[in-house]
Image (cartoon, rainbow, N blue to C red):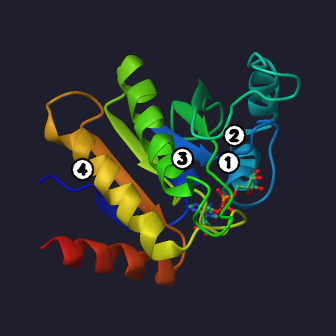
Amino acid sequence: MRLPSIIKGDITCVEADAIVNAANEWMLGGGGVDGAIHHAAGPELYVACKAVSETTPGIRCPVGEARITPGFDLPAKFVIHTVGPRWKGGLNNEEEMLARCYRNSLALAANNNIVSIAFPLISTGAFAFPILPACRIAIRECSTFLKDDSLPSEITLVAYSGADLAALRQVIQELK
Ligand code: AR6
């Protein structure tokens, strides 16, 4: 099984073709990694996000889906915005919705001939998804994508904290 690479750091500094943003359905910025990405990309990112068409009033990216914009001032050429589920106890399809974030982001990357992509741990901050199940889903979905020879062929999971890095490493150990 091919596993995604795991690093600790700030995703806004990662030199991949695309980085993924843990956005919200409005896609107009926020806190956490979303705020950091908008800050590093510069104001053009907000303009590009605002130009994304709305599926229903105010909603540019429903939970589990993904949208792409340029990366502007980021080292990454593209930002793929996805919206994770808010954790509400686990009985509201949260696991499947989180899996869809990874799957749809990777499919959108493939459609844009993206070779390298880096993800933060979607939903594990403000949206309160428990860290270990979130890491299991992230690693499983990335590994599934890496099975065939299709793009993207270089997938990195970026842990922001030491605790998140330890959780990712624990899941890798479980798979060995
Ligand atoms: N690089 C990598 N990972 C980061 C960075 C960074 N610079 N900053 C934070 N993280 P969160 P969510 C990690 O809250 O849970 C926003 O307001 C963080 O430690 O950013 O999906 C949006 O607008 C955590 O592990 O995203 C939405 O409203 C992970 O990124 C909402 O929060 C995700 O934490 C989305 O919540």
Packing grade of label 4 (10 A; few <14, some 14-19, many >=20) is some
Q: Nearer the viewer, mark 2 or mark 4?
A: 4
Query: Callout 1: 10 Å neighbours few (<14), some, many (20+)?
Result: many
* Front label number (2 vs 1): 1
Callout 2–callout 1 Cβ contact below 8 Å? yes
**Residue flagged by tag 3: what amino acid is it?**
Met
**Residue type, mark 1 in image:** Ile
Q: Nearer the viewer, residue 60 or 47?
A: 60
Residue 162 in the image: state x and y as whole percent: 48, 83
Q: Secondary structure at mark 2?
A: helix
Disc 3: which residue: 97
Cα distance between the residues tagged 4 and 1: 25 Å
Which is nearer the N-term, disc 4 or disc 3? 3
The label nearer to you, 4 versus 3, is 3
Counting residues from the N terminus, which is met first, the one under dot 3 or under dot 1?
A: 1
User: What is the x, y in percent for residue 167?
Assistant: 40, 79
Please identify the quadrant where the N terminus is shown.
Answer: bottom left
x%, y% of residue 99?
44, 48
Answer above or below: position of 88 versus 144.
below
Q: Is residue 144 positioned above or below 112 on the image?
A: below
Q: Which residue is mark 1?
A: 37
Q: Quadrant of residue 110?
A: top left
N-terminal-most mark, 2 or 4: 2
**Do tag 2 and tag 4 residues touch (Cβ < 8 Å)?**
no
Question: In the image, which disc is placed on residue 41?
Answer: 2
Measure how far apart labels 2 and 4 are at the Cα level: 29 Å
Q: Which mark is residue 143?
A: 4
User: Disc 3 vs disc 2: Cβ atoms closer than 8 Å?
Assistant: no
